[in-house]
Image: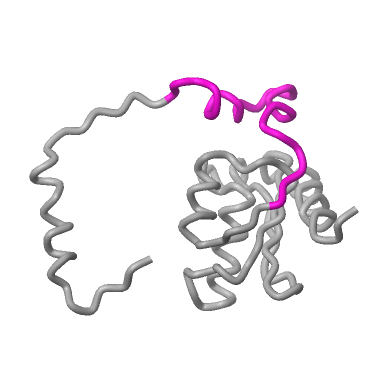
Amino acid sequence: MDKYMNKAINEAIKGVLKGDGGPFGAVIVKNGKIVAKAHNKVVITNDPTAHAEINAIRKASKKLKTFDLSDCEIYTNCMPCPMCIGAIRWANIKTIYYGATSADVDAIGFRDKEFYDEEYLNLHSIDRQESLKPFLFWEKKEDKVLY
């Protein structure tokens, strides 16, 4: 078994035993060293965004003092949900190693698979011109940080 995946699995088990949230764990590695590990804390924090991957990204960013984790890779015991994939991409992590699939966790009562298989969102654009105003301010800003 891969040593980093083993750490992610153990982190997931730790979270389940503590009652913090679902059975999900993640580890972020840079240059062969673990910089962050985390588990799901949705239940204990009442925060639906407190997934293992996002918690690990927050820890790694804080430890490395950067939002750019492009030199890192992430190991997670389950295929990341769309929210987590989005966070991983925003953090510039290019390699994701995962164990279980969304269908695997769907089979035990989670609803991950529906986010991939169904037209789930009901999106409607309104007030587009007004909503573009902050982007115009950003465009003119000289000291902007792009990410």
**In which quarter of the view is residue 95 placed?**
bottom right
Q: Say if the magenta span includes residue 6.
A: no
Name the outermost residue toward the right. Answer: 1
49 sits left or right of 53 in the view: left
Number of numbered discs present?
A: 0
- Give how far across and how far down residue 65 sits, in percent: 51, 78
Q: Which quarter of the figure is the C terminus placed in?
A: bottom left
Q: Which residues are magenta?
A: 97-120
143 and 19: which is toward the camera: 143
Q: Can you say whether 49 is above or below 3 in the image?
A: above
Reply above or below: 9 against 92: above
Q: Determine the residue positioned at 12% across, 37% down.
A: 127
Residue 42 position within the rendered picture, expressed as x and y whole percent measured from the top left: 59, 43
Q: Residue at x 86, y 60 (%)?
A: 3
Rendered view: 105 above or below 73? above
Give the quarter of the image for residue 129: top left
